[in-house]
Image (spheres, rainbow, N blue to C red):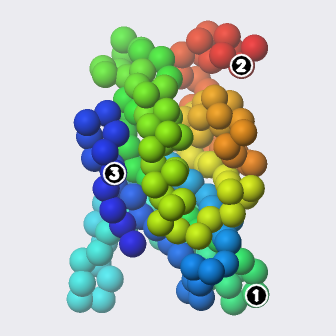
Amino acid sequence: SKFPYPCLYLFYQVQILLPTNYDKTKKYPVTYMFGRHMRYRQAGSDTEMGDRILYSDSWNVANSIATMENAGENPGIIAVIYAQLPEFTPWENEEFMGTGKAYAFAKSVYAHFIPTFERKYSVDNDSRSIMGADVAGLFAYYTAVLFPETFNSCGLFSPSFWYNREELKTFMS
């Protein structure tokens, strides 16, 4: 599934990966993945949404889920949310125009997207993860610190901790 949701008067693409045996009477762990890389790819004769997070040219999440399911493990539900540099950066930076909108985006994800998503899908509220890479990794870290009661774990892949290093040091302390 994929559906847009409004935040900051914009719409963001979201892709949902459900377990193949998804049963809405059961509760599933959920991972909220954030990414910037979005492109189209061919799948057979149809054009479908693809990206570097889900498919084999990067994180390979879709194949990892299939491997887990084949081994009898429960991968849970994966929600991949796409945004851009401004939404993933907590502080303005004059080198990157329009940055510094992460707080508003994180608040919207926390207050609007997660509750809406978890009303639609059967999610175990005690088993939520957030993750991202690059500036999306910075955003995942920032959001996990802002809302520690919401996420049980945080996965960071090469987070952009170089971005506004002094502001980040202050935030971390």
Q: Which mark is residue 172?
A: 2
CA gap between label 2 and label 1 equals 39 Å
Q: Quadrant of the C terminus?
A: top right
Q: Earlier in the sequence, mark 3 or mark 2?
A: 3
Q: In the rendered image of this protein, does residue 130 appear above or below residue 72?
A: above
Disc 1: CA contacts within 10 A as few (<14), some (14-19) or many (>=20):
few
Query: Left or right: where does residue 96 sit relative to residue 114?
Result: left
Q: CA distance from mark 3 to mark 2?
A: 30 Å
Where's residue 138, x and y in %? 58, 33
Q: Quadrant of residue 66?
A: bottom right
Whether residue 30 is situated above or below residue 114 in the rendered picture: below
Q: Nearer the viewer, residue 120 or 130?
A: 120
Which of the pair 145/62 is nearer the observer? 145
Closest to the observer, 66 or 24: 24
Question: Which label number is shown at residue 72?
Answer: 1
Q: Amino acid at mark 2?
A: Met
Residue at 65 percent across and 34 percent down: it is 147
- For the residues labelled 3 and 2, say whether their Cβ atoms are less than 8 Å apart: no
* Disc 3: which residue: 5
In percent of the image, x 62 and y 65: which residue is there? 123
- Which element carries disc 3, helix, strand or loop? strand
Quarter of the image with the N terminus in it: bottom left
Mark 1 or mark 3: whose residue is earlier in sequence: 3
Q: Is residue 35 visible?
A: no
Residue toward you, 141 or 163:
141
* Secondary structure at numbered mark 2: helix
Instruction: Characterize the local packing of mark 3: few (<14), some (14-19) or many (20 or more) Cα atoms within 10 angstroms.
Output: some
Question: What secondary structure is marked by label 1?
Answer: loop
Q: Which amino acid type is marked by label 1?
A: Gly
What is the x, y in percent for residue 48?
Answer: 29, 75
